[in-house]
Amino acid sequence: MSGFERQWQGRFERFATRHQPDHLVSGWSAAGLRRRVATFEALLDRGLLGEGTRALELGCGAGTYVRLLAKRGYPVVGLDYSLPSLHRAVAADLSQAGRYVAGDASRLPFQDRSFRAVTCIGVLQALEGPETALGEIARILEPGGVAVVETLNPWGVLATLRRISALVRRQPTRLRYGSPREVERSMASRGLRPVRRLSILLPPRSLPGLERALGRPWVIGALHAVPGLRALTSQAYWIVGVKA
């Protein structure tokens, strides 16, 4: 594990030790987690997973998606390398509907073709290089299985300002950003065919009132219609891939 990744593991362990709410355990804003959950539920409502699909939440943090999937009847496992985060996830899962495993994204402790679905949300940003993790996702997926992978948008306004600030201060960036095309190419080279790309739109933390407006159809339509605007306003992208 690289120094960059060890620093992130330490952060996640501190988050889980100091905080109770799911979004803080995972390092998100409340709006960030809320909009991600809404996006995932919309995918499920549109038939993302078949009945009885065995799923893995890779980097489960406080277990938000484990509980969501279990509530909908899917057998699900949550994996994380932060033991304090796993303790939070187990404590929050009052019905004990999910299973929880300690492990690393670069060496998943599962046999080949063990799952029909994998979610990997908020993970690539904390990895020095995502290629090994994407290869592991492909390995443990059954043929025809689905992966939902998140990458932070490097071209967003806030991300660009953060990188400029780090450059001026001669400091490394604390987050890894990856263009969706780059991640899609990496997925495809490992047998995960990208079939869909979704934008995660978030208001600045100083303007939480914009969250509702960002969800309105006419705003979404405008962001899709104006070239380059979505790239400037998206905080992250989700890429849905299917194993060949």
Image (cartoon, helix red, strand yellow):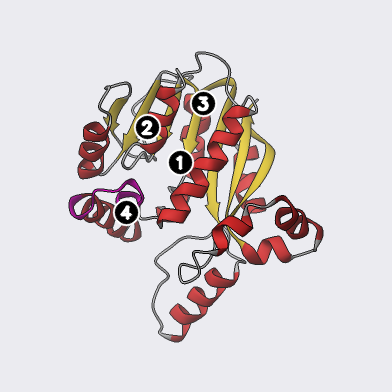
Earlier in the chain: of badge 2 and badge 3, it is 2
* Callout 4 touching callout 3 (CB < 8 Å): no
Return the disc, 1 or 3, that comes first in the chain's sequence.
3
In the figure, is residue 124 to the left or right of 104?
A: right
Residue 231 drawn at (x, y percent): 67, 62
Between tags 2 and 3, which lies in front?
3
The kind of secondary structure element at disc 4 is helix
Under circle 1, the secondary element is helix
Circle on res. 84: none
Q: Nearer the viewer, residue 136 or 218?
A: 218
The numbered disc on residue 133 is 1
Stretch of the chain drawn in magenta: 17-26
**What residue is pinned by disc 2?**
108
Query: What residue is at 53 percent from the left and 30 percent from the top?
Result: 138
State which mark lies toward you, 4 or 3.
4
Q: CA distance from mark 2 to mark 4?
A: 25 Å
In-front residue for pair 211/225: 211
Q: Give whichever of discs 1 and 2 has the lower sequence position.
A: 2
